[in-house]
Image (cartoon, helix red, strand yellow):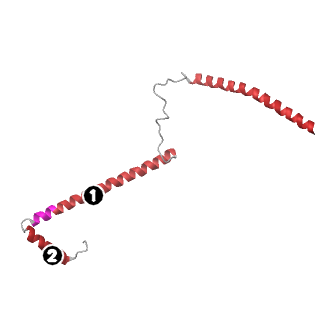
Amino acid sequence: MFGMGMPELIIILVIALIVIGPKKLPDLAKALGKGMSEFKKATQEIKESLNVEEEFKEVKEDLIDSVSGLNEPLDLEHDKPPDDETPKYDDFDEMLDDYDQAKQKEEEESEPLKEEMTQKDSGASTEKNRDD
């Protein structure tokens, strides 16, 4: 223990017996033993709490990785619509009608572009024929 042998321990005990006295030495040893046991219990509890915190951290990281595939948790606050915002459509049918109208507008706008492209393609092919 601490690089001390039996002769050193006996000398320390004899000096403690002389300095403290035979009446108070048992009480001192008893208090020292209780203090050491309390210290061991406290250090053991701290070690256990640190192990539990590390395990929780690992489990949290694993859960985040498995659910989202990311290394950091998702910030879901930005994904939520504001509470004061009212829905644009009353039911699903209105939304579908609006979608169909938007698609028709898109098709109508793209038709003149298609015609221009076909005209350009036919003009380019006639120019190629003239060069031949």
- The residue that mark 2 highlights is 11
Instruction: Specify the amino acid type for callout 1.
Output: Thr
- The residue that mark 1 highlights is 43
Q: Secondary structure at mark 1?
A: helix
- Quarter the N terminus occupies: bottom left
Q: Are marks 1 and 2 in contact (CB under 8 Å)?
A: no
User: Mark 1 to mark 2: distance in Å?
Assistant: 31 Å
How far across and how far down the image is residue 5, in percent?
A: 22, 76
Q: Nearer the viewer, mark 1 or mark 2?
A: 2
Disc 1: CA contacts within 10 A as few (<14), some (14-19) or many (>=20): few
Dot label at residue 62: none
Pick the residue in front: 128 or 10: 128
In the rendered view, tell whether residue 115 sits above or below residue 24.
above
Residue at 25% over, 56% down: 42
Residue at 47% over, 28% down: 82
How far across and how far down the image is residue 123, in percent?
A: 86, 32
Residue 100: which quarter of the image?
A: top right
Report the side of 53 relative to 5 (left or right): right
Disc 2: CA contacts within 10 A as few (<14), some (14-19) or many (>=20): few
In the rendered view, tell whether residue 56 sits above or below residue 119.
below
Residue 116: which quarter of the image?
A: top right
Report the side of 73 relative to 38 (left or right): right
How far across and how far down the image is residue 49, in percent?
A: 32, 53
Magenta span covers which residues? 25-31
Instruction: Specify the amino acid type for callout 2.
Output: Ile
Residue at 10% over, 66% down: 25
Residue at 89% over, 37% down: 128
